[in-house]
Image (cartoon, rainbow, N blue to C red):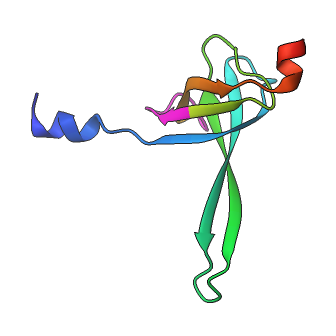
């Protein structure tokens, strides 16, 4: 394996909560980021939404999931579902 392919093989992994699963094979994951405010040093929470590919449509709203960076799959999708860490209470009952 060459040096270039070893660097390219490293892909980012993020954890978040599914906020929408209405699309076919696509989920929207909200990822929380905590950081210290540059001036006031208070810990601030900010959120960002990522569109992820869910091949088997197994993730439901409220599930905690891990997503991994991948090649562009559509205009907005650049992530794919790795695994579901915890299921939401609603999806277990349904």
Which quadrant of the structure image shows residue 83? top right
User: Does residue 12 appear to the left or right of 38 in the view shown?
Assistant: left
Residue in view at x 59 percent, y 36 percent: 75
| Magenta part of the chain | 67-77
Which quadrant of the structure image shows residue 1? top left
Vertical comparison of 48 with 55: above or below:
below
Vertical comparison of 26 with 55: above or below:
below
Residue closest to the eye, 33 or 71: 33
Which quadrant of the structure image shows residue 35? bottom right
Residue in view at x 74 percent, y 29 percent: 63
| Residue 70 image point, x, y percent | 45, 32
Residue in view at x 68 percent, y 24 percent: 26
Q: Examine the structure image and report whether residue 69 is included in the region drawn in magenta.
A: yes
| Residue 77 image point, x, y percent | 58, 34
| Residue 50 image point, x, y percent | 64, 42
Q: Residue furthest bottom?
A: 39
Q: Examine the structure image and report whether residue 47 is included in the region drawn in magenta.
A: no
Q: Which quadrant is home to the C terminus? A: top right
Q: Main secondary structure of the magenta part?
A: loop
Residue in view at x 84 percent, y 19 percent: 91
């Amino acid at each position: 394996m060459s040096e270039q392919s070893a660097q390219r093989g490293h892909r980012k992994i993020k954890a978040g909560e599914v906020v929408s699963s209405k699309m076919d094979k696509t989920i929207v994951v909200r990822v929380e980021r905590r950081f210290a405010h540059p001036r006031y040093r208070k810990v601030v929470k900010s959120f960002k939404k990522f569109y992820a590919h869910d091949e088997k449509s197994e993730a439901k709203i409220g599930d905690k999931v891990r997503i991994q960076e991948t090649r562009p799959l559509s205009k907005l999708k650049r992530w794919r579902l790795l695994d579901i860490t915890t299921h939401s209470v609603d999806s277990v009952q349904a």
